[in-house]
Image: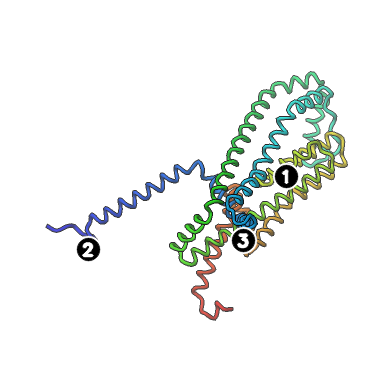
Amino acid sequence: MTTPTVTGGEPARDLTQVLLKALAILGLMVTSLWVMRPFAGALVWATMITVATWPLMLRLQRALRGKRWAAVLVMTLALLAIFVLPVLVAVGTVVGNVDRMSAWVQSTIAAGVPGPPAWIGKLPLVGAKIATAWTDLATTPPAELQSRVAPYTAGIVRGIAATIGTVGATLLQLLLIVILSAILFTTGDTAAQGVIRLARRLGGDHGENAVRLAGQAVRAVALGVVITALVQTVLAGIGLAVSGVPFAGALTAIAFVLCIAQLGPILVLAPAVVWLYYAGHTGWGTVLLVWTLIVGTIDNVLRPVLIKRGADLPLLLVFAGVIGGLIGFGMVGLFVGPVMLAVTYTLTVAWVREGEPAESKST
C-alpha cells in the first residue's frame, strides 16, 4: 500500500504540516496585533519621533562622552517639555481662572450686551441675520437674559467635564508616547538593524534603500511640522501680545499644542479677534484679523517647502503626500502619506531604470 503523494512526489502529510504551520504563524501574528492594538497609535508616534530625532540623539550622546543613558534622559525631558508641559499649562490656566471667567460672564449679563458694530450688518450672506440676533440680545433686559442662559448652564458644565476628560486621556496618550520613545531611543540600534535585515531579505538592495528613504522622509516631515508649528506659534504669540489680548502667554501655549496637532492657531486667534471687537478695540481687532489670516494659512506653503528641503523628492509629491495623508489618516497621515509616496516613487523609478539600456541610465 503506497502513501498518497502530491505534485513533486512529496507525501500528503507534508502539505498538511506546511498548512498547519502557516495557520499557526498567522494565528500568532493576529493575536500579537490584537494584543498590541491599544498601543498601536502611541507606538506609531513614538517610532516617528525616534526616527526623526535619532541624529540629534546621537549628537547628544557624543557630546555626553558616549553615555547613551544620559542622552536618552535629555531627549525624554525634552519630549516632556514639548508635548506634555504645554497641555499642563493650558489646563492649569483654564482651571485656575474658572472663577474669574464665571464672574466675567455674570458681570457681562448684568451690564447687558452692547449693540452690534455697524460692520456686522454689512457682512455678505450672514451679516443681516447676525445683526438681528445680536440686536435681540442687546435689547433683552438683564434678568430675562440671565433666565435664558440658565438652562444651558448644566450643558456647559457637562461639556467642560467632557473636555477635561478628553484632555486627560490625551495627556495619558502623550505620556505613553514619551515612555515608548525613551525605550526606542535605548534600543534603537538593534531595532533599526532588524528592520533593515528584514527589508533586505524581502527586497534585496531596493528593500534596504526603501527603508532608508522612509527614515529620511520621516525626518523631513518632522522637520517641516515642528518648524512650521514653531513659526506659527511665535507669530500668533506676537499678535496676541501686541493687540493686548489677556492671557497671551497661556493662549500661545494652547496655540502651540493646536499647531502640533495640525489644527492651526486660528482656533485661538479667531476668538481673540471677536473679543477685541466686543471690547470696542476695533482697530486692534482688524489688525489681528488680518494677522490671523496670514498666520493661519502660512503652513500650507511653509511646511511642503521645508519637507522638500529635507527629502530629495518632487514638491508635488510631497504636497500630495502631506495633504492626502492628513485627509486619509488624520494627523499621523502627515508622516504616512509622504513616506508611502516616497517609497513607491523610488521603487518605481528604480524598476523603470533597471529595464533601460546602460546608455540611458548614465544620461
252 or 163: nearer the viewer = 252
Q: CA distance from mark 1 to mark 2?
A: 69 Å
So how many labels did they put on this image?
3
Q: Is residue 135 above or below residue 324?
A: above
- Quickly name the residue at label 1: 265
Provide residue 89's location: percent of width, then percent of height.
70, 37
- Quickly name the residue at label 3: 317
- Quickly name the residue at label 2: 9
Q: Quadrant of residue 275?
A: top right
Q: Residues within 10 Å of mark 2 (few under 14, many from 20)?
A: few
- Left or right? Give the position of 214 relative to 16: right
Q: Earlier in the sequence, mark 3 or mark 1?
A: 1
Q: Earlier in the sequence, mark 1 or mark 2?
A: 2
Q: Quadrant of residue 118?
A: top right
Provide residue 291's location: percent of width, then percent of height.
80, 47
What type is the residue that disc 1 sits on?
Pro
10 or 324: nearer the viewer = 10
Q: Residue furthest left?
A: 1
What type is the residue that disc 2 sits on?
Gly
Q: Earlier in the sequence, mark 2 or mark 3?
A: 2
Q: Residues within 10 Å of mark 1 (few under 14, many from 20)?
A: many
- Left or right? Give the position of 114 relative to 220: right
Mark 2 or 3, which is nearer the eye? Answer: 2
Helix, strand or loop at label 2? It is loop
What type is the residue that disc 3 sits on?
Leu
Q: Evaluate if marks 2 and 3 touch, with contact meaning CB atoms under 8 Å apart.
A: no
Q: Is residue 169 above or below residue 347?
A: above
User: Residue sitting at 72 percent across and 41 percent down?
Assistant: 253
